[in-house]
Amino acid sequence: MSGTISGTHLSAGMRAFVADQDWLTVVQPPTHAADLNPVEGVWSLLRRCFLSNIAFTGPEHLIRTVRQGLRTIQNRSDLIDGCPEGAGLTLTSA
């Protein structure tokens, strides 16, 4: 296990589970590390491609637009694959 396991996100039960897994490495990122979070890539895509230059007519219009953008991103594997890569992460199979 690498890094420090602390904070509110990791309970005693989770720490015990991690300690029992010799194959598992846990690294606690800094409190705010947007560049390490692949989800930030999804939000960036939404902001740049689907939410820019729109005057929303109400909450329903915003929700509908976000859902349409997420559906489009979900169906484009090249966009989804770029989010972890943009955070410096790689996906590997066991």
Image (spheres, rainbow, N blue to C red):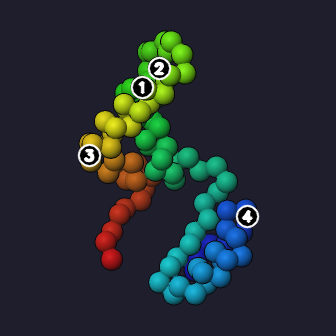
Q: Are marks 3 and 2 in contact (CB under 8 Å)?
A: no
Under circle 1, the secondary element is helix
In this view of the protein, which residue sits in the foreground, 68 or 90? 68
Q: Is residue 1 above or below residue 67?
A: below
Which amino acid does the dot numbered 3 rest on?
Asp
Q: Are marks 1 and 4 in contact (CB under 8 Å)?
A: no
Which residue is disc 2 drawn over? 61
Q: Residue under circle 1?
A: 65
Can you tell which mark lies on residue 42?
Answer: none
The answer for how far apart the CA atoms under marks 3 and 2 are is 27 Å
Q: Secondary structure at mark 4?
A: loop
Q: CA distance from mark 1 to mark 4?
A: 35 Å
Residue depicted at x 73% and y 62%: 8
Q: Earlier in the sequence, mark 3 or mark 2?
A: 2
Q: Residue furthest front?
A: 60
Q: Position of residue 14 (x, y in %)?
A: 64, 74
Residue 34 falls left or right of residue 46: right
Give neighbour class at mark 2: few <14, some 14-19, many 20+ (Cα, 10 Å): few
Residue 15, image x, y percentages: 66, 77
Per the model, the C-alpha gap separating discs 1 and 3 is 21 Å
Give the labeled residue for mark 4.
7
The answer to whether residue 15 is left or right of residue 69 is right
Of callouts 1 and 3, which one flags the residue occurring earlier in the amino acid sequence?
1
